Image (cartoon, rainbow, N blue to C red):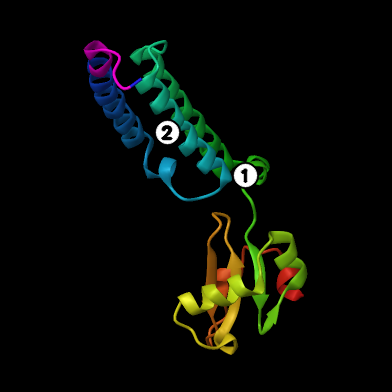
Amino acid sequence: MFFDSWAGLGRVLIVGTLSYAALVAVLRVSGSRTLSKMNAFDLVVTVSLGSTLATVLLSKDVALAEGVLALSLLVGLQFAVTWLSVRSSRVSDLVKAEPTLLFYRGRLLGDQLRRARVTEEEVRSAVRGQGIGSMDAIEAVVLETDGTIAVVERTDATPSALGDLPRQAAEA
């Protein structure tokens, strides 16, 4: 059906505007961490926010106040879990993945590549994407917790940015 009623269009316009404004206000209060590109947990929260907003907008069965409460609940739970993960290594381990070393000092780490389901071509592509033409110029390539591939160039300095990687991977 292309058109149901003017009242339905008016509801979407009013509820959509108000729920959007409420979502922006809730996100501003919660801080930028709520929408940061950090890990799978954050992605789930972001998708849930979008789904909730769409439901509030399009379902006549969900009142605006219920939708705002649902949005606030999701953001509040995300805030609570991230607050706890900063203070507790157990919670942090539960909701966050570790970065994975894929290439280290001239060697592709086959076991790590297979475990992370990343191909050699994807590693080389990430290196080229950084404008680097030789794998010899690379200290390490890391699959970060947010799914991006980071390239660490070889320098004279000790690569302190690799300190949070699992010890056995760096020694492999």
Q: Is residue 135 above or below residue 118?
A: below
At x 53%, y 84%, the residue is 157
At x 57%, y 45%, the residue is 40
Residue 72 numbered mark, or none: none
Q: Is residue 162 above or below residue 52?
A: below
How many numbered marks does the figure carry?
2
**How far apart are the two marked residues, 2 and 1, measured between alpha carbons?**
25 Å
- Where residue 112 sits in the image (x, y, percent)? 73, 66
Residue 79 in the figure: left or right of residue 65: right
Which callout, 2 or 1, points at the residue further toward the start of the chain? 2
Residue 100 in the figure: left or right of residue 21: right
Residue under circle 1?
92
- Report helix, strand or loop for mark 2: helix
Residue type of the residue flagged with mark 2: Gly
Residue type of the residue flagged with mark 1: Ser
Residue 9 in the figure: left or right of residue 126: left
Magenta stretch: give its range: 2-9
Membership of 56 in magenta stretch: no
At x 70%, y 63%, the residue is 166
Membership of 6 in magenta stretch: yes
- Where residue 21 sits in the image (x, y, percent)? 26, 28
Residue under circle 2?
50
Q: Is residue 165 above or below residue 18?
A: below
At x 66%, y 83%, the residue is 105
- Where residue 15 sits in the image (x, y, percent)? 28, 19
Give the camera-side residue of 73 and 157. Answer: 73
- Where residue 101 sits in the image (x, y, percent)? 66, 68
For label 1, the crowd category at 10 Å Cα-Cα, with few meaning under 14, some 14 to 19 and many 20 or more, is some
The image quadrant where one finds the N terminus is top left
The quarter of the displayed image where residue 24 is located: top left
For label 2, the crowd category at 10 Å Cα-Cα, with few meaning under 14, some 14 to 19 and many 20 or more, is some
